[in-house]
Image (cartoon, rainbow, N blue to C red):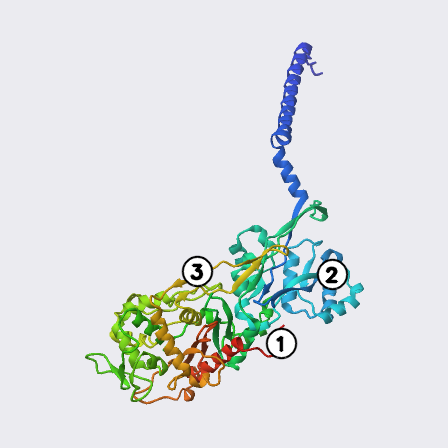
Amino acid sequence: MKPLRRQKLKNLHAEAEQFRRRAVLGFLGIALAMLGLAAGYFRLQVLQHEEYQTRSEANRIKPRPIVPARGLIYDRNGRLLADNVPAYRLEIVPEQVANLEATLTGLAALVRLDDEDLERFRETRRATRGFRPIPLKLRLDEGELARLAVNRHRFPGVEVVPYLTRRYPYGELFSHIIGYVGRVDVADLEAMGDSRNAALTHIGKAGIERYYEPRLRGEIGYEEIETNVEGRALGVLRRHDAKPGADLWLSVDARLQQAMVDAFAGQDGAAVAVDPATGEILGMVSLPGYDPNLFINGISHTDWQALQAPARPLFNRNVLGGFPPGSTIKPFMALAGLEEGLITPEETVLSTGEFFLPGQARGYRDWRPGGHGTVNLTESLAQSVNTYYFKLAVELGVDRIDSFMGRLGFGEPTGIDLAGEISGVRPSRSWKRGRFNQDWFPGDTVNVGIGQGYWVTSPLQMAQATAMLANGGLRHRLHLVRASQAGFNAPKVSEPQPPGVRVVKDDANLAAVHEGLVAVMHGPTGSGRASAAGAAYRMAGKSGTAQRTSRKGLERMDPKKLPYHLRHQAWFIAYAPAEKPTIAVAVLVEHGGSGSGAAAPVARRILDAWLLPPPEDTTR
């Protein structure tokens, strides 16, 4: 038998004491936990009440942007140049569609869907909740709208949504002035900065649309939408209306603009017409142009390729183009000589057909073999005598030429309200040193005197300088916008412009140059008299031919027999009526060969369109 174990007697008092200790510790733990929980609730509900209330409201209330109507653009007579018109897009709500692929296939039979549309839809679908509508096609034509209306019952979850889109009624006529809007990209959003602008779908990409983008787009409003936890809209709590974009009135005239295009008769080039009294642009064309409507909702690959033609339809020759001015620089050289006291209108120069710098055997030729004989300032302009300006340029020197031409605005932007305007090149010692790291030579000065060599001038700069000759020596900032209106009931406000800067010291000097320019058009030896024949008004003008290739020896070249890409650039500047000018123009015909032969007739047709009573107006 196993021995019996002794049983230890329980110490009931000790066990009770142990239980009490454990109970107290448990109670204290529970009490501390409750105090911690209460402190947490106090912190959340009292100390941080406003923060979490704001977060809660933010989860419940979502802002939905309201994009304002874009401002309209008119010409000086109220013709609408940029409009907002109703359009329709096709949208799909994925969760309401039983078979998405079958729906897409069925829709493709009714509307034209290209690969880009489908790819954009599928990418957006992957990043969007199923209850949110996704655009499938951004622009429906009338035939597609009709087919969808008839077959609407077959496609649950498919909606045709109306919206406003930009339209340019005149197409390419104003393409290089108005520009166009296009779809917003990442770079646009970064440039705009304000996060509210993420709601924009389109933004100005070129022309007036780009330069005045903040004013045209207005201010975005928003609705406060109550949503559930999934983000579904339950109702509108408050609405903060958007502020519509401002309407703009331009200084250009649609009738003159069409006449300027017609005047080129299919030739490539550029022209600017200016009101000499104000600097307002009356018309401005760069040819060929393009249809800005192609860009609004994304240009097709085929259309884009067509715009890459050698003639560069997208290139704005007035703003971005730079060309040697040729003989159109001569009136300004003459004015510089008069202002500096180096010449008088009566002094004469003998033109023998060739000019030599002292100590040099190389001659600089006049355009007429044998020269023009003895000529004064008036005849130097009328016959465009190179020898006169070779000699004058050497006497002035490049430093005084640089200084005076800078006063007239050459070598710097005119300030026109379009983005990207070039400065051009006003030749100088410092410019040549910086560009080529070379010294300035006397022969460089000779070429500068007739607008050749290093000169680079834009049609805008030539128009600004020509307007200065016409208005008594004032240099005005060129501009396109005359007035704006910030809202339907707001007043129409004129656009403020800086006052003109006087750049000529003596009116008698301007009068002498003016006499020479009138002789160009109406004198018996004037190089432009053929273009002025039969005119009902008197005009002042000057042709210029910027050579793209030099002749050999004394041999003359027929510019029309040169290869097209080597033909000279043809310039003409003019203002009229000569006694009290109301219009100044600068015309460039690319590869025109001769200023008097190609550009002068274009200028005459432009002046006629502005000064003579119009035929029946068909632009309204």
Three-letter amino acid code at disc 3?
Pro
Residue at image location 54% in from the left, 65% down from the top: 250
Among numbered discs 3 and 2, the one appearing first in the sequence:
2
Among numbered discs 1 and 2, the one appearing first in the sequence:
2
Mark 1, Cα crowd under 10 Å, few <14 / some 14-19 / many 20+, is: few
User: For this rendering, which residue is in front, 437 or 175?
Assistant: 175
**Which numbered marker is on residue 618?**
1
Three-letter amino acid code at disc 1?
Thr
Mark 3, Cα crowd under 10 Å, few <14 / some 14-19 / many 20+, is: few
Residue 244's x, y, as percent? 62, 55
Quadrant of the frame with the N terminus: top right
Residue picked out by circle 2: 159
User: For this rendering, which residue is in front, 483 or 444?
Assistant: 483
User: For this rendering, which residue is in front, 573 or 364?
Assistant: 573
Give the mark toward the camera: 3 or 2. 3
- Say above or below: 493 vs 36: below
- Residue 363 visible in the displayed image: no
Q: Secondary structure at mark 1?
A: loop
- Residue 89 placement, left or right of 604: right
* Marks 1/2: CA–CA distance: 40 Å
- Residue 372 placement, left or right of 4: left
- Residue 315 placement, left or right of 4: left
Residue picked out by circle 3: 499
Three-letter amino acid code at disc 2?
Glu
* Marks 3/1: CA–CA distance: 36 Å
* Marks 3/2: CA–CA distance: 55 Å
Q: Secondary structure at mark 2?
A: strand
Residue at image location 68% in from the left, 14% down from the top: 5
